[in-house]
Image (tube, rainbow, N blue to C red):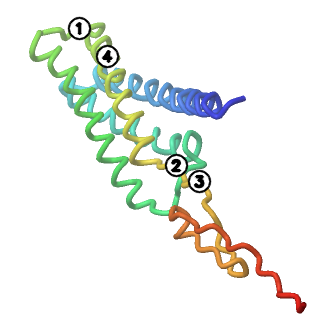
Amino acid sequence: MGQGSSGLHRLTHEIAKFGAVGAFGMVVNFAVSNALWHLTSLQAVRANVIATVVAIACNYIGFRYFTYRDRDKTDRTREMVLFLAFSAIGLVIENGILYAAIYGFGWDSAIERNVFKFLGIGIATLFRFWSYRTWVFRALPVAGPVADPAAGTDPEAADEPVPAPAPPVRPRQKV
């Protein structure tokens, strides 16, 4: 199998795992939002924001410990800050579409809410997939050259041109 096809295989595997976590998050999101819509007097978008936040919390656990468990774990504070920032942007995308449907077009029936919620989740998911894999759950660097003090190699100088070795010196023979 060529290197390109193994990269495609890894991406396909990542998308499948991201989709599994996302599907669970979407079920949580729809369950919470529909429960809040039907059981409380909260405005539709406010209830949906709460549902999205609950789903984001569930998704972080799934992404960190399932989808991206093999990724860099050295700076959890940075990871969490970026995850929350990009999740907040996704929340604005998702709920902005719902807001436009309800308050811009008057589409506020239970079916219309769910259709536009689904559309918002879909668009926000594309953004989240790109941002999480690019910025939040970074791939670990590929192992580079290792220093060998006996051979005098320096891994920092690996990108520099290496001079050709000098030809072996033969001792002169006496004539």
* Camera-side residue of 145 and 151: 151
Say which residue label 2 marks. Answer: 139
Q: Element under label 1?
A: loop
Say which residue label 3 marks. Answer: 142
For the residues labelled 1 and 3, the Cα–Cα distance comes to: 51 Å
Say which residue label 1 marks. Answer: 109
User: Mark 3 and 2 residues: CB-CB less than 8 Å, in contact?
Assistant: no
> The N terminus is located in which quarter?
top right
For the residues labelled 4 and 2, the Cα–Cα distance comes to: 29 Å
Total labels: the figure holds 4
Residue drawn at x 83%, y 87% is 172
Which of label 3 and label 4 is nearer to you? 3
Residue drawn at x 30%, y 7% is 111
CA neighbours of label 3 inside 10 A, class few (<14), some (14 to 19), many (20+): few
Q: As drawn, is 146 to the left or to the right of 158?
A: right
Q: Element under label 2?
A: loop
CA neighbours of label 2 inside 10 A, class few (<14), some (14 to 19), many (20+): some
CA neighbours of label 4 inside 10 A, class few (<14), some (14 to 19), many (20+): some
Q: Where's residue 71, x and y in %?
A: 55, 50
User: Does label 4 or label 2 sit earlier along the sequence?
Assistant: 4
User: Does label 1 or label 3 sit earlier along the sequence?
Assistant: 1
For the residues labelled 3 and 2, the Cα–Cα distance comes to: 9 Å
Q: Where's residue 93, x and y in %?
A: 24, 29
Say which residue label 4 marks. Answer: 119
Label 2 sits on what residue type? Ala
* Camera-side residue of 128 and 115: 128
In this view, 19 is above or below 138: above
User: Does label 3 or label 4 sit earlier along the sequence?
Assistant: 4
Task: Report the residue that reaches farthest toward the front.
Answer: 175
